[in-house]
Amino acid sequence: MLRRFAPNEYLASAIEVDLQALKARGIEGLIVDLDNTLVPRYEDEPSEELKGWLQEVARAGLRVCIVSNNWTSRVAAIASELGVSIVKGAGKPLAKAFRQGMRILGTRPAETAVIGDQLFTDVLGGNRLGLYTVLVVPLSDKEMLHTRVLRKLECRVLDALAKRRMISSDVG
Ligand SMILES: [Mg+2]
């Protein structure tokens, strides 16, 4: 039960992910969440740091697709500024959200990693399809109401995972 929520890695932020280690395990493409993973929820401008990281990702030979449950024009604007493909209004944790991302990336599940800040959308959905999942600490605590409600439950699951040493407890 708890296992389906356990990410393969838990990091302080997306840019800390070890790109070479992902390549070494056969990962070819990244499905990356947008809000509070790449950009704080209520900001429109991607940071220079993020742009630099995306260049590193490309240099490492990894493809990227943003898969976001957000459906607004802001999401498309950010993706186009970053020059990255996007699936918006994706419906994570539903499988179709991740399948659409993999279709764009041209990857199979074993070649795909998910990076995101939410257990119940990014990690649960990715795990169910057998993708390599990376949970990151959210970039900001400003969130939509339904996300704030889910965060309370998420906190309890994270505690339970940490107690069982299924994630490192020194990150969040
Ligand atoms: Mg998010």
Image: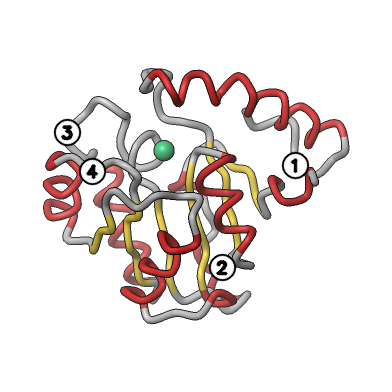
Label 1 to label 2: alpha-carbon separation: 18 Å
Label 4 to label 3: alpha-carbon separation: 14 Å
Label 3 to label 2: alpha-carbon separation: 29 Å
Residue drawn at the location 25% of the way across and 25% of the way down: 42
Label 3 to label 1: alpha-carbon separation: 31 Å
Residue drawn at the location 35% of the way across and 71% of the way down: 63
Q: Is residue 103 left or right of residue 110?
A: left
Of residues 150 and 133, the one nearer the viewer is 150
Q: Is residue 37 left or right of residue 93?
A: left
Residue contact at pointers 3 and 2, CB within 8 angstroms: no
x, y (%) of residue 95? 50, 62
Snapshot quadrant of residue 99: bottom left
Q: Amino acid at mark 1?
A: Ile
Residue at mark 3: 44
Residue at mark 2: 22
Residue drawn at the location 50% of the way across and 50% of the way down: 93
> Quarter containing ligand 1?
top left
Residue contact at pointers 4 and 2, CB within 8 angstroms: no
Of residues 71 and 39, the one nearer the viewer is 71
Label 4 to label 2: alpha-carbon separation: 29 Å
Residue at mark 4: 71
Q: For the residue with label 3, is its CB less than 8 Å from the closest atom of ligand 1? A: no
Residue drawn at the location 35% of the way across and 54% of the way down: 67
Label 1 to label 4: alpha-carbon separation: 31 Å
| Secondary structure category for the residue under label 3 | loop
Q: For the residue with label 4, is its CB less than 8 Å from the closest atom of ligand 1? A: no
| Dot 2 crowding, Cα within 10 Å, few <14, some 14–19, many 20+ | some
As displayed, is residue 85 above or below residue 78? below
Q: Is residue 133 left or right of residue 73?
A: right
Residue at mark 1: 167
